[in-house]
Amino acid sequence: MTDGDPNSPTVVAVELERLRGTVEAGFARVDGALALLVQRSDQTDKQLADHEARLDALERSRWPLASITALAAVGGLALGAWQLAGG
């Protein structure tokens, strides 16, 4: 066997080393992409938690529609009674 033979140990070792380098570079790219995705996921989780807190605050501060309807009915009833009483 000579070094020009594709089955020689030297050629196989060189090709395996080249393959190893390619695989390592690919894993490094995948690792970087995964790190970026984790960072974006963390940012999205923080934004979602902030939006949920703001929505909860808005829901607590607004009046329910049923309460507004009841107040309008009581106001209308009071106005009608006042008008009937001669006011």
Image (cartoon, grey):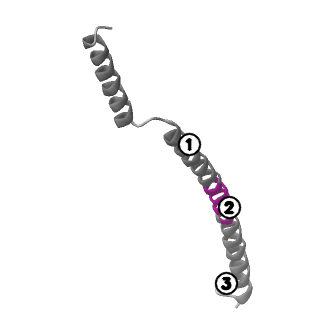
Foreground residue, 61 or 71? 71
* Residue at left offset 60%, top offset 54%: 45
Question: What is the distance, in whole Å, between disc 1 and disc 3 at their CAs?
Answer: 75 Å
Q: Residue furthest front?
A: 85
**Helix, strand or loop for disc 2:** helix
Give the residues drawn in magenta, as a range: 31-42
Q: Residue furthest bottom?
A: 1
Foreground residue, 28 or 34? 34
* Residue at left offset 64%, top offset 64%: 30
Measuring from the top left, give residue 60's x and y in whole percent.
51, 42
Asked if disc 1 and disc 3 are in contact, CB closer than 8 Å, the reply is no
Q: Nearer the viewer, mark 2 or mark 3?
A: 2
* Residue 37 forms part of the magenta stretch: yes
Q: Amino acid at mark 3?
A: Asp
User: In which quarter of the view is residue 5 placed?
Assistant: bottom right
In the rendering, which numbered label is found on residue 35?
A: 2
In the rendered image, which residue does mark 1 sit on? Answer: 57
Which of disc 2 and disc 1 is earlier in sequence?
Answer: 2
